[in-house]
Image (cartoon, grey):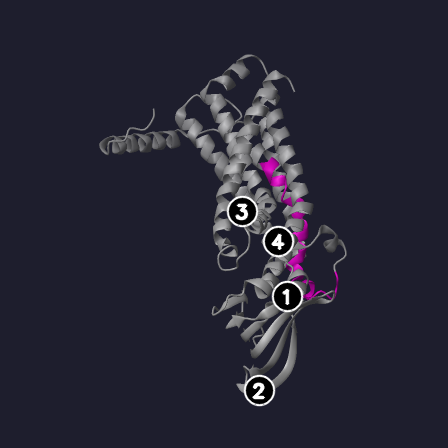
Amino acid sequence: MNLLERYIFKRTFFAFLFGLGALCGVVWLTQALRDLDLMTSKGQTLGIFFTMTSLVLPLLIMVLAPFALMIAVIYCLNALNSDSELVVINASGASMKTVMKPILALGLIVTLAGGFLSLYMTPLSLITLRHYITQVRADLVANIVKEGLFTEIEDGMVFHISGRGPNGALLGLFMTDDRDPEQKFVYLAQRAHILKTTEGTFLIMEDGTIQRQIVENNNISLIDFKSYAIDLSELAAREATSLAKPRERPISYFFNPDPDDPYFTQYTGRVRAEFHDRFSNPFYGLGFASICLLFLGRAQTTRQGRSIAIGSAIAGCILLRILGFTATSLTNSSATAIPAMYIVPLAGILIPLILLTSGWQPKIPTSWAFAIEIISNRMRKYFTKTGFTPAP
């Protein structure tokens, strides 16, 4: 790259980092607030809280990076046009490649980084998050269940103890298990304790009863026991295997899926769509950069024309992503739609670049420019009446 190309690349790159950081920060904050009960009702440390909420960052970066790149390219090209730098570049005899090269280079970097996140980092972080969730649930039973409080370990499983005895004994245990929609269990025990072995973590209950209710016929049975054990490690096993979603599976799983996997047999379409989405999704960053270059890569002399160009670039990027979501949805239903998942982003890259290199430039209809001018004048009058004067 020459000096001018490095200048454009650097300016767009830092705008991209700032936009990506702002977008990820806002979305991460909403996720963190939603999981705030990790430190309140579930009694976890601040380190566990930040670790678990930060594990969603690879997914957020993968999803938001193309939009951050779109914002950065629009900002940079619009600033270059406002400062008349695009006019100077054109007047100096420099070709369109001077503007295209740094923007497309950044788009290629975002595409490669998105591919790494999509194929490796995102599934790794999500499955690690699942293991943290099961660890929190196990710690909840062993250490965090409070005396006199009903504590929900997971959906349909609630614990209550009346007190704690020597050596960590749980006194007056009451537990309900409604996870199975066909039957419900209620456990009562005078004492209980947690036993951790190499084979797993067990809840050992002593001197109690088990009440079992069959939902279909409302049949209730009662069993007395002197000692009864529940395997708490099955929560971790069930979370990490049978309930793992396609996005949490490593890429190697898709090349050789287990035919006996209940998720694969029941949701084959989702697995198929997720596999191809991991390879096609990173190309949208380069597609967004190409669309923005098509509408904003050349100098605009009027404010109305530039506003329409910005709006057209944003609309083009959004339309491209909607078409991508549609192709993914169709692939979920039928394997014949698989080529569309690749055609859409590649068309978003190639068509704008072909039009741009051929010299085609979008023409702004005169009626649109007059309409924008009328709306702008009315808004300016309104703000003036309310005491607010927008910047000229």
Q: Residue at x 62, y 53 (%)?
A: 129
Q: Residues within 10 Å of mark 1 (few under 14, many from 20)?
A: some
Mark with earlier residue (1, 4): 4
In this image, 269 relative to 60: left or right? right
* Residue with the mark numbered 1: 235
Numbered mark located on residue 89 in the image: none
Q: Residue at x 61, y 41 (%)?
A: 345
Label 2 to label 4, Cα distance in Å? 38 Å
Numbered mark located on residue 322 in the image: 3
Q: x, y (%) of residue 197? A: 72, 66
Q: x, y (%) of residue 282? A: 63, 41
* Residue with the mark numbered 2: 222
Give amino acid for label 3: Ile
Label 1 to label 2, Cα distance in Å? 25 Å
SS of the residue at dot 3?
A: helix
Question: Where the N terminus falls, by quadrant?
Answer: top right
Question: Where the C terminus falls, by quadrant?
Answer: top left
* Residue with the mark numbered 4: 129
Label 3 to label 2, Cα distance in Å? 56 Å
Mark with earlier residue (3, 1): 1
Which quadrant of the structure image shows residue 118? top right
Of marks 3 and 4, the one in the foreground: 4
Tell me whether the residue at label 3 lies in contact with that at label 2, contact meaning CB atoms closer than 8 angstroms.
no
- The stretch of residues the image draws in magenta is 258-287
Q: Residues within 10 Å of mark 3 (few under 14, many from 20)?
A: few
Label 1 to label 4, Cα distance in Å? 14 Å
Give amino acid for label 4: Leu
The front one of 172 and 315 is 172
Mark with earlier residue (1, 2): 2
Label 3 to label 4, Cα distance in Å? 29 Å
Q: x, y (%) of residue 322? A: 53, 47
